[in-house]
Amino acid sequence: MFRMWGKIWKNNRMIRDTVISITDYSLSRTAMVFQSLEDICYEFDLGKPIWLDANISEFQRISKTRFTQDSFIEHIPFDFLEIQIIEE
């Protein structure tokens, strides 16, 4: 089972979180990451963030990254959205 943890942080406090599980193993790992991120954003009622070069390299290294205001088109009322793979 593929599981991704999405967390919204503001003032060094986690104000909201969710875990998305995907059991469809016909998808590639990349497709599972994008689908999980889309599900997290839908649950938090957010637009999808833009993957910047820093996000891509950090996610490839440690399976975790943070999306700040720079990654979103609209204004966000929090400091950052963090995603992390917790099970593959």
Image (tube, rainbow, N blue to C red):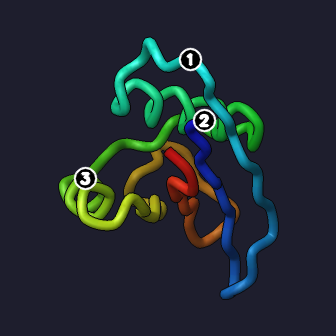
- SS for callout 2: loop
Q: Earlier in the sequence, mark 2 or mark 1?
A: 2
Q: Residue 24: which disc?
A: 1
Q: Which residue corresponds to mark 2?
A: 1
| Rendered-image quadrant of the N terminus | top right
Question: Separation of disc 2 and disc 1 at Cα?
Answer: 8 Å
Q: Quadrant of residue 42?
A: top right
Identify the amino acid type marked 1.
Answer: Asp
Task: Give the side of residue 67 with respect to residue 39, left or right.
Answer: left
Residue 35 position in % (x across, y down): 52, 26
Frontmost residue, 62 versus 1: 1
Residue type marked 2: Met
> How busy is the neighbourhood of tag 1: few (under 14 within 10 Å), some, or many (20 plus)?
few
Image position of 85 (left or right of 23): left
Q: Are marks 2 and 3 in contact (CB under 8 Å)?
A: no
Chain-order first, disc 3 or disc 1: 1
Q: Amino acid at mark 3?
A: Ile
Q: Where is residue 12 shown, x and y percent of the image?
A: 67, 87
Q: Residue 56 has which mark?
A: 3
The answer to whether the residue labelled 2 contacts the one labelled 1, judged by CB atoms less than 8 Å apart, is no
